[in-house]
């Protein structure tokens, strides 16, 4: 199936969910990947791609390597291969590879094309769609980056066959995120079905991609409704920073962040205790963490102000309002938030 992205300034591209088809590019192409994906799947990709000139650059595997050093590896390779403004980068990996490749493409010679071929569930349902790119630094997650849309996204469920169970579960957290905030029927589908079958996985990917595409088409630069896709992430990003991006996979941290956000929703009267428990039970059904011990509540709270969505003295929280709806709030008194954080000590 194909899902279309159509943005202002005549930016259009397709998200294809199917087996990789043959691709030929009459230009220089660089594939950006990591050692794990290169060992598992590079031959499969190379069987389906040809180019005027083709090379591969490998960057270290893991969220802790989503940094300036890895960006330099990509850019230096591009210069060594003498890429020009008509060249193409292909992100072949998970969310880290996609974000890093997209950002490199956005700044190399002031912007060149890139394509997403995501290999993890998390990247297939979320990170590869919408043009957010970036890297982390000591102040927080994705604080350096740009909006730079890919020319295409090719989602091949084949890659999920070698995905470790923990990585798969981390991707499901992003699926649940979209179901809770935008689609009650999708949430009920996840409650009543497992994702062990290829058919159910493809349906979950398709529903997630359609949801995100609809939101991105309405709000590319996150000036409004797109911020809702960060449900759970305000809490999650601080958790990742606090653990140096090493203890939890991103999707695992999202699951914990969702639980924190839902407790805050319940405290504010936006969400019933019953629905809070339903979401937590669904996360646990897919072995996604739902608990965490905060090291320092005041420090955790102060780190919220480094979040990209926050403005001056206002922290922007995305909160579920029942299941299938959400609300963006930036006027929550500190004592409400502190009360929730203290429950996670």
Image: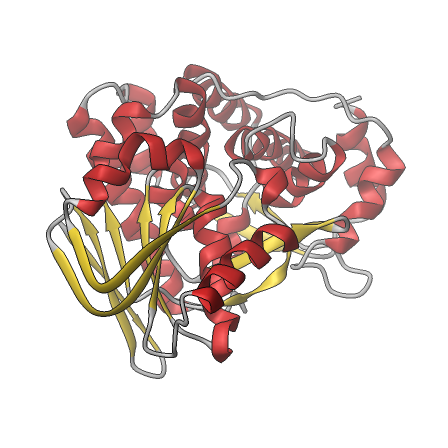
Q: Is residue 7 something that shows in the picture?
A: yes
Q: Residue at x 65, y 45 (%)?
A: 234
Image position of 51 with respect to 305: above or below: below
Image position of 125 with respect to 255: above or below: below
Q: Residue at x 27, y 35 (%)?
A: 41
Q: State left or right for residue 111 relative to residue 146.
A: left
The picture places residue 80, in percent across and down from the top left corner, at: 46, 65
Q: Quadrant of the C terminus?
A: top right
Q: State left or right for residue 159 relative to residue 272.
A: left
- Residue in front for this viewpoint, 119 or 314: 119
Q: Is residue 156 something that shows in the picture?
A: no
Image position of 227 with respect to 6: above or below: above
- Residue 15 falls in image quadrant: bottom left
The picture places residue 144, in percent across and down from the top left corner, at: 64, 61
- Residue in front for this viewpoint, 135 or 59: 59
The picture places residue 314, in percent across and down from the top left corner, at: 77, 59
Q: Residue at x 45, y 20 (%)?
A: 166
The picture places residue 301, in percent across and down from the top left corner, at: 81, 42
In the picture as drawn, the residue positioned furthest to the bottom comes out as 9
In the picture as drawn, the residue positioned furthest to the left comes out as 22
């Amino acid at each position: 199936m194909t899902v279309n992205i159509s943005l202002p300034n005549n930016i259009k591209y397709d998200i294809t969910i199917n087996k990789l088809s043959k691709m030929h590019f009459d230009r220089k192409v660089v594939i950006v990947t990591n050692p794990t994906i290169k060992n598992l799947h590079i031959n499969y990709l190379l069987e389906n791609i040809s180019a005027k000139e083709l090379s591969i650059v490998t960057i270290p595997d893991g969220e802790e390597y989503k940094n300036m050093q890895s960006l330099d590896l990509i850019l230096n390779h591009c210069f060594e291969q003498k890429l020009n403004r008509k060249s193409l980068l292909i992100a072949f990996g998970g969310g880290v590879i996609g974000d890093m490749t997209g950002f490199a493409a956005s700044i190399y010679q002031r912007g060149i094309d890139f394509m997403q071929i995501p290999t993890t569930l998390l990247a297939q349902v979320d990170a590869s769609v919408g043009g957010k790119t970036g890297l982390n630094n000591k102040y927080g997650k994705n604080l350096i980056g740009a909006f730079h849309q890919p020319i295409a996204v090719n989602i091949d469920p084949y890659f999920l066959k070698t995905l470790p169970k923990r990585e798969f579960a981390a991707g499901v957290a992003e699926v649940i995120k979209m179901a809770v905030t935008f689609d009650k029927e999708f949430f009920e589908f996840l409650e009543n079905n497992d994702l062990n079958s290829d058919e159910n996985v493809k349906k979950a990917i398709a529903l997630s991609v359609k949801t995100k595409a609809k939101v991105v088409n309405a709000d590319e630069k996150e000036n409004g409704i797109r911020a809702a896709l960060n449900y759970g992430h305000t809490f999650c990003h601080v958790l990742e920073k606090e653990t140096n991006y090493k203890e939890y996979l991103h999707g695992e941290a999202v699951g914990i962040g969702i639980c924190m956000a839902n407790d805050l929703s319940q405290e504010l009267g936006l969400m019933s205790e019953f629905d809070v428990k339903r979401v937590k039970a669904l996360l646990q059904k897919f072995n996604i963490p739902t608990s965490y011990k905060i090291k320092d509540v005041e420090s955790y709270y102060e780190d919220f102000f480094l979040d990209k969505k926050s403005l001056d003295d206002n922290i922007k929280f995305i909160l579920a309002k029942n299941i299938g709806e959400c609300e963006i709030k930036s006027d929550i008194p500190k004592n409400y938030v502190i009360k929730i954080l203290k429950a996670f000590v």
